[in-house]
């Protein structure tokens, strides 16, 4: 089947096959990574685990038993025992920068394949039409003309067949990452207000006093 495709599509078949192989590899590899590391955040359960986290006994905490990137982020943040809201934010930011790129890896290249595959198909179309017109100029052998048209159609179809699933999986993976970002931001706000409630109240009171004095 691959040999027939190469014979029909011509030279452009090689980059198209390479693009197809890379697309399949990235989709398969990213799917495994998401299965192992992506978990929807149950906010209530996470808040309970965060509230009960004991930095002096980190091995026996619920966060250490949870799977997924969110659990890793909060486990690594809380085991550093942040003493203030600012420290908590800094540790959390550092962990997110360290952990989240694991989900985004290679997705840029998947998007590149989705964009370049139709162009490769178009290149094959042009190549096939050039061959067709060359045959016409030499007298118009029907069999050779059919080969040129066949090359044009095959490469166009191959480019679209590669591009469409690549684009679909790219947007699918990024939609999941965006959802996780939103859930993490929501959990961050809730966990901050829970862990550093007194500090937030004191900061709010100081702000109100300053406003009263300035008024």
Image (spheres, helix red, strand yellow):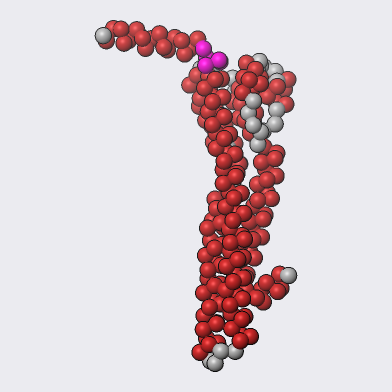
Quarter in which the N terminus is drawn:
bottom right
Whether residue 64 is visible here, answered yes or no, is yes
Quarter in which the C terminus is drawn:
top left
Q: Residue at x 53, y 61 (%)?
A: 116
- Name the residue at the front extreme: 142
Query: What range is drawn magenta here?
Result: 193-197
Q: Residue at x 59, y 19 (%)?
A: 81
Residue 207: name its quadrant.
top left
Q: Main secondary structure of the magenta part?
A: helix
What x and y, as percent, mark residue 12?
A: 59, 71
- Name the residue at the left extreme: 215
Which of 24/63 is in front?
Answer: 24
Q: Residue at x 56, y 46 (%)?
A: 171
Which of 202/84 is in front?
Answer: 202
Magenta highlight on residue 172: no
What x and y, as percent, mark residue 187?
A: 56, 24
Magenta highlight on residue 194: yes
What x and y, as percent, mark residue 177?
A: 58, 39
Q: Residue at x 60, y 44 (%)?
A: 173
| Horizontal side, residue 55 vs residue 202: left or right | right
- Name the residue at the bottom extreme: 139
């Amino acid at each position: 089947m691959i040999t027939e495709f190469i014979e029909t599509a011509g030279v452009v078949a090689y980059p198209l096959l390479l693009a197809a192989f890379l697309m399949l590899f990235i989709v398969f590899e990213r799917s495994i990574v998401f299965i192992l590391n992506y978990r929807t955040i149950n906010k209530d359960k996470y808040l309970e685990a965060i509230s009960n986290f004991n930095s002096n006994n980190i091995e026996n905490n619920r966060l250490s038993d949870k799977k997924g990137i969110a659990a890793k982020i909060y486990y690594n943040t809380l085991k550093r025992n942040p003493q203030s809201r600012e420290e908590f934010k800094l540790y959390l930011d550092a962990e997110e920068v360290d952990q989240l790129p694991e989900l985004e890896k290679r997705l840029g290249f998947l998007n590149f394949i989705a964009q370049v595959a139709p162009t490769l198909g178009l290149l094959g179309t042009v190549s096939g039409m050039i061959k067709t017109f060359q045959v016409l100029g030499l007298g118009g052998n029907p069999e050779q003309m059919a080969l040129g048209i066949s090359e044009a159609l095959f490469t166009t179809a191959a480019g679209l067949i590669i591009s469409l699933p690549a684009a679909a999986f790219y947007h699918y993976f990024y939609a999941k990452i965006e959802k996780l970002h939103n859930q993490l931001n929501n959990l961050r706000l809730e966990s901050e207000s829970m862990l550093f409630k007194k500090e937030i109240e004191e900061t709010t009171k100081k702000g109100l006093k300053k406003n009263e004095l300035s008024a």
